[in-house]
Image (spheres, rainbow, N blue to C red):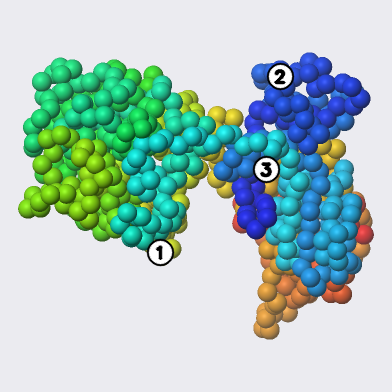
Amino acid sequence: MDHLTIKKGNNKINIKKSKKFVGIRTKGAKSAMDIPVVEKQLLPNVGGFELIKFQDTDKSVDTLLDEVRDERDVDLGTHVYYVEGSNRPMIPTGEIFLIFQDKASEEEQKVILDEYNLILVERRSASTIIVKVSKNSPNPVKAAHFLNKIGMVKSAQPDLDTYVDEYPAVALPVDPLLPHEWHLKNPGKIYDANYNIKRGADAKVIDAWNRLGNMGSPNITIAVIDNGFDLSHPDLNNNIVNPYDLWNDSSHITQGDPRFDHGTPCASVAIAPATGTGMVGVAPNSKFMPVNGTSYGWRATEKMFDYCIEKNADIISCSWGSVDPAFDLDDIKKAAIHKAATQGRNGKGCIIVYAGGNEGENYLNFYAQHPNVIAVAASTSKDEHATYSNKGRQITVCAPSNGDWPIIAARASWDEGTPFQVGPRRYWFDGVSRGDRYKHFGGTSSAAPLVAGVCALILSANSDLTSAEVKQILIRTADKIGNPSDYMNGYSTKFGYGRINADKAVAEAFRMKDGFTPNPGNDSTDTPFPGSDDGDDTGGSTTSPDTDSGSGTGIPPILGGGSTSTPSKSGEGLFRFSVQRQPSQGFGVQVFAFADYGNVLIKAESIEKQFDQPVIININKFGGRTVFKVIVGAFGGIDDARSLQRRLENAGIKGFIRNLSTLK
């Protein structure tokens, strides 16, 4: 099982197994570095283990760990985990802090401990105990995950040790407009306007900086394709690389035309550097490639995207397009975008971000509909849909923008502001100036470069990611906002997969760098905790590697857990059956546990007919009630049981391998 949900304090957290690092506890004065296959030691003592990395071989970490456990000088070996929201390695010590519901008797508690072959270490109160795993237990992380699915268990928390100090927080920039940039971190109030917004309705950018330990890598280049870049602006004139003007086919960017000023605020949202004088962009350390001139012609489209490929842009931000059906994309334009998204960055693909459009339509800007781009909608400072933001099935994510309270962005010196307004209201929503070179800004035009900046932070964490992987990270880590009814199967035509979360996205990029390849809903491999068997349940209720599920559906279905059934109803029919003793030997697949025998009959009749296998019932007393465990099949070898297990799973019936010799 590569990733699991466990309870920690009052929260549920997701943890994922490292594909590179393990913990080794040696005997005596020996060090893990004395083991030939160990490449290096990362930390000398985490929970009594040395945190080490194996040498690169054709063997998996699971295989190497099993081999090392057999070394004469090795006491224990364990997998290492990462908690979602942190890039610190966590090592399970083998103990679990277990709190039962108040009415659970010691007898009932013992039934659960016996089910998982756990050993009582210490009793703290009538309902609170500390247990440890035994040779025949699931590993402590998995055991805690299973225990938390049981109704009589209030909380099961594995002891996960790590070093104490977090990565140091980034010293925040002193730019005076940073406190106004609610889209980076929303405090719940616009203080100089005494206006309430929604705390936490932001892109979690400052949290992402803290996770990175910096504000992004200077090795990442964001190309902004637009019109009207004021390259004299203090928040645009740093870190410029390879400027290009499509209209004059030169590196000299056209400036000063009052008809074109859009590129200045868009670029500042993504890349404004931390100079201490104005605002700060999402990725202030990134290099800035201004590409001036937007054109619909296919030759111009090819030229702008080919230029970004040639000059090694990592990310391309575009806050323009059209919803006019007359300007749908032809095959040449589609191919130009596809080429950049798949061939840029030396084959990893440029990450291309497009604004979804501000027309309030039920379909997107045609460029944003391209399958290789990240299409961005706008949400507000109250985590609501911005009514102007176009809706549609192609939206990838949304990002904070105006619609309630606008964001702050750089202003070109020739920007004439909002027509028919005078004074500060030409530039400021509430008429209060926050600086002569800045203004209130919004639309999907600001949401798109915000996402582009977050993509730069993702690549700062893991520069090996492809453009498709970056898009999937944004999808997997987005926060669902708005009304739950807006979503169907996790997707909304207003918000896409949700509001972007830079911190989660950076954490995911770090985990993928560690070797984790996401495969939601299919956690099919796990090596048990040191000292346990190889997952075949040759003693106890260890879940087979073939059946583990990150959703917890493969838990041994003890009464009170998620797999029990409602009582059977009258009118279910007549049953004829014969009864004979089953020898306590071999292997089967446990699929249910019931307190109502009517359910046993109904399920047994259905399963026996469907799979042509004997159905075995194990009868136990549980808290004064009789519990019937339903096991399918009785095989001499575990491989046959696993084959049946797969057949059951294909039919939608979850189960786990049961060693019949443990059932008396």
Residue 195 found in image quarter: bottom left
Q: How many marks?
A: 3
Q: Is residue 561 above or below residue 418?
A: below
Callout 3 touching callout 2 (CB < 8 Å): no
Task: Identify the residue at horizontal 13%, vertical 45% (top origin).
Answer: 417
Left or right: residue 307 versus residue 477 is left
Q: Secondary structure at mark 1?
A: loop
Q: Residue at x 8, y 37 (%)?
A: 259
In this rendering, position of residue 399 left or right of residue 539: left
Mark 1 / mark 3, whichever is N-terminal: 3
C-alpha span from label 3 to label 2: 26 Å
Mark nearer the N terminus (2 vs 1): 2
Residue visible at 91% across and 63% down?
581
Real-space CA distance between mark 1 and mark 3, rounded to the nearest whole angstrom:
33 Å
Name the element at disc 3. loop
How crowded pointer 1 is (Cα within 10 Å; few <14, some 14-19, many 20+) is rated as few
The location of residue 132, given as percent across then percent down, is 85, 48
Quadrant for residue 50, please give it: top right
Residue at 79%, 50% (x, y): give it. 96
Question: Tags 1 and 3 in contact by the CB under 8 Å rule?
Answer: no
Mark 1 highlights which residue?
483
Residue beneath label 3, please?
Answer: 1
The disc at residue 40 is 2
Closer to the eye: label 3 or 2: 2
Taking the view exactly as shown, the residue that stands out farthest to the bottom is 570
Residue 386 on image: x %, y %:
29, 56
Quadrant placement of the C terminus: bottom right
- Give the amino acid type for the residue marked by disc 2 in the picture: Lys
Against 180, residue 279 (above or below) is above
**Of residues 330 and 651, the one drawn nearer to the viewer in this rendering:** 330
Quarter of the rendering containing residue 232: top left
